[in-house]
Image (cartoon, coloured by chain):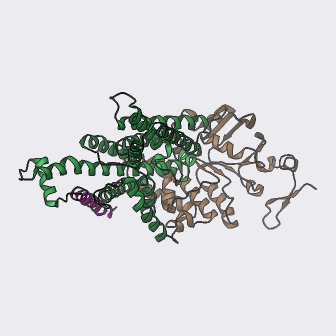
Chain colours: A brown, B green
Amino acid sequence: MTVMTALAHAPLACEGLSLRLGDREVLQDIDLSVMPGETLGVVGPNGSGKSTLLKLLAGLRTPSSGSVRLLGEALERMPRRRVAQSLALVEQQADTLDAISVYDAVALGRTPWLSALAPFGADDRAIVEQALADADAGHLRRRLWGELSGGERQRVHIARALAQRPQVLLLDEPTNHLDIQHQLSLLRQVQALPVTTLVALHDLNQALTCDRLAVLDQGRLVALGKPEVVLTPERLLGTFGVQAHYLVDPYDGARVLRLCVRS
Amino acid sequence: MSRLLPISAFALFALCLAMLAGIAIGETRISAEVVWQVLANQLWQAGHALDPIDAGIVWNYRLPRTLVAAACGAGLATCGVILQALLRNPLAEPYLLGLSAGASTGAVAVGLFGLGGAVLSLSAGAFIGALAAFALVLVLSRASGSRHDNSQVILAGIAGSQLFNALTAFLITKSATAEQARGILFWLLGNLSGVRWPAVWLALPVALLGLAVCLWHRRALDAFTFGADSAASLGVPVRRTQWLLISCTALVTAVMVSIVGAIGFVGLVIPHALRLLLGPGHSRLLPASALGGALFLIVADILSRTLIAGQVIPVGVVTALIGAPVFALILVSRRGRP
């Protein structure tokens, strides 16, 4: 497959994507394509533009230049509803003061599929149930938003995104508030789903489990490829300012990153 | 779903009962039977023999007054629901966008200076003033705001309100006699006294149409639960929806203010009270708030006519006097629940 046909088949791709706020270049000239079914991790230090990139790819912000293609179509020309039928975004901190139940919050994911007169049908209920189960949030369904812990809220957001039945899923640091068990299980669950996923991550050891990684530094894409190729000790020192060693876990032979502050 | 029908039936029954009370109770008490006979005569020529004065009071004064009270209550409560949902601010209410301030300036300009010649009534002046203030707030918030930022709308509304309130105060202190100032103050606090049938034909369709437009967008309103970005990622065209629904509330509010003055509290408290009782889903909250607002304002109007014999208290004073304690009661009784 040539590069051009690969790009045409990528569920989500961007070309020359830039965003300038005032005279600050938040993102500069990002070329990226996510392949069908893969999990692409986006890593980078604070302020490197990870969340902004996700917002641009979801069409929530308009880029200063460049373009995004979703399922082969130019994103800026697609109606919002059709974008939401193909792509779901889980933001870092979406909160509400409303006393909404977990079930109703997840049911919001059906919004792009329901017209004004359509009732919330049996199909929708089944999809919501499945989404609750996939995000391990089924037991929370009757709880109110205000009663949930940070990690539980995160799982409800993910369930809502899954209820959209997207082909492309964007996750902005989804493991931030999760306990260790859910941190480990969540990424595995997401990777097992038949969706193309782009996930911004802080934890570099979690990033190692992605199919490919994109490294952002000060708004630029500085590396893209297999995790072990991309996350070299030199790059970790240059981009993150940390010293890194790979260790091999004697238990299962997995490569583990050990990081420490530059001495 | 199974409970929906009996609850709706009960709510409509309560509304009819309140309207009956609104027509029967007043300086001249009229029995429910006479009210019914007047309505029957007017609606299908039943041919009951009635005192023409009673018939006139019922048909020309109290029925239009009650209908307008219901329409205003429903319209203002609906607008409150919409603005609280779109702006994600619990203090949002129909007058947030500078409408009442603009209306008062318009009404004062017409009332004191006869602006617009004899063509413009006080109501028309209020309507134009309200829309002028809204336009200013809209331009200000657009010029200053980023794409999904609601705080700009709220701040622009505060600035617009302050400006028009100051204008009103300036005009009154500069030109009004004590008697004129009293009249204007009375009008500003809400007044259903002069309401006749033409006002009904304006208020009722506007309230119903506003409710219908909002109900059509109920799912989009639900999608704003987690903010504008979240609504956008759920497929809602955020700007278009905000613009359409905010303009719709502005139009409804401007019509209501121009008919009855700036009745406060209904648009703020009724949506909150019903959200506490029913939850945040708009398919239930919108019709419930419309009904609740209608009931509330009918009852407030009855009280405004009967609390002090021979004197009408501005209905806005009554809405606050009974609304504040009732709301406090609901808040306290829900304490401890999430």
| Vertical comparison of A12 with A111: above or below | above
Count of all numbered marks drawn on residues in the image: 0
Picture coordinates of residue B131, whole percent (x, y): 44, 36
> In the image, is residue B98 part of the stretch drawn in magenta?
no
| Vertical comparison of B300 with B162: above or below | below
Tell me: A107 left or right of A76.
Answer: left
Picture coordinates of residue B125, whole percent (x, y): 39, 35
| Vertical comparison of B98 with B337: above or below | above
Q: Residue furthest right?
A: A263
Tell me: B327 left or right of A70.
Answer: left
Q: Main secondary structure of the magenta part?
A: helix
Span of residues in magenta = B1-25
Residue occupying image coordinates x 44% and y 50%: B80
Picture coordinates of residue B182, whole percent (x, y): 40, 46
Residue A67 figure quarter:
top right
Tell me: B186 left or right of B194.
Answer: right
| Vertical comparison of B241 with A262: above or below | above
Judging depth in this view, the residue of B264 and A176 nearest the camera is B264
Residue B32 figure quarter:
bottom left
Picture coordinates of residue B46, whole percent (x, y): 7, 51
Judging depth in this view, the residue of A93 and A177 nearest the camera is A93
In this orientation, does residue A50 appear? Answer: yes
In this orientation, does residue A121 appear? Answer: no
The quarter of the picture where the N terminus of chain B appears is: bottom left
Tell me: A97 left or right of B52.
Answer: right
Residue occupying image coordinates x 21% and y 58%: B24
> In the image, is residue B17 part of the stretch drawn in magenta?
yes
Judging depth in this view, the residue of B214 and B334 nearest the camera is B334
Residue occupying image coordinates x 65% and y 43%: A35
Judging depth in this view, the residue of A225 and B99 nearest the camera is B99
